[in-house]
Image (cartoon, helix red, strand yellow):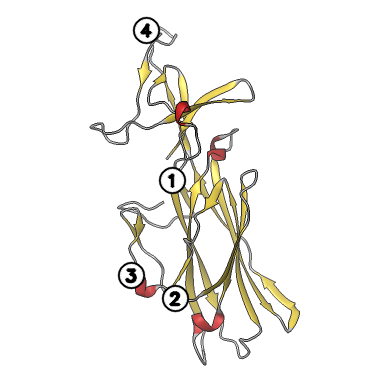
Amino acid sequence: KGSGEATWKETAAAGVGDIVRFYVAVTIPAYNNVSALNLTVNDTLTNLKYTTNSVKVYSEKPELGNNKVTTSNDKIITGAIKKTTVGNYVSGKQDLKFDLDYQKIMGENASQSKTVYVYYEAIMQKEAVTGTNHQGENVATLTYSNAVNPESQYTTNKKETDVYTYHLQVNKKKGGKDEALEGAKFSVYTEAEGGEPLKFVEVTENDTTKYYRLAVEGDAEGSKVTQIGADFQIRGLD
């Protein structure tokens, strides 16, 4: 997740609805016969949903700042993505495939390997806060294959990145007593001096567990609240 002090990490935190940024470093060997070479980045997202058209290939590691990539656009390799295949987001899972264009990346008469960075974005989904395992996951591999000799296909080891989301237990009690103060209400802000309060929806899970989570696109406007009662858990925070 990008911020003013952002650095790339193998594990990170994000709230429900937040943009999460990823890159896959791909080292491509120099080949003699490029016409039959296929290169594909495979990715499985869990509780994360790909942001349409966000994929780019950079010639150097992208830098982050102020919630965006700050690397100059002239470091983007034009035409490096031949095809993007985006699967449906079903039951918290989504599969992606990015087919790379060897010649656009390596150029003519390449004599040595080259490392490029396949960058893309995803949104943390509300499924990340259900149950007890509150996180998203990104698992990526790279497949090299030769159309002339299909048995030559090779897939790298999986590279996994975990994105955690956190919860907050909110309560207001009578002085010296354990029970919640009846009628107490809370609002939650991202700034110390106020601003707009965050919006939440109330969720009942398995008919027993009740909590609030951050409201996201698709939640009915009538279900969103900016004040919550005492003795409730808030999920989906970063």
Question: Relative to residue 222, is residue 142 depicted above or below?
Answer: below
Separation of residues labelled 4 and 2 (CA atoms): 64 Å
Residue, disc 4: 176
Q: Which residue is mark 3?
A: 72
Q: Earlier in the sequence, mark 1 or mark 4?
A: 1
Q: Nearer the viewer, residue 204 or 63?
A: 204
Residue under pointer 1: 18
**Cα–Cα gap, marks 4 and 3:** 58 Å
**Which residue type carries mark 4?**
Gly
Crowding around mark 2 (Cα neighbors within 10 Å: few <14, some 14 to 19, many 20+) is: some
Residue 27 place in picture, x, y as percent: 53, 75
Secondary structure found at label 4: loop
* Label at residue 147: none
Q: Secondary structure at mark 2?
A: loop
N-term mark: 4 or 3: 3
Mark sitting earlier along the chain (4/2): 2
Residue at the far left in the pictured view: 193
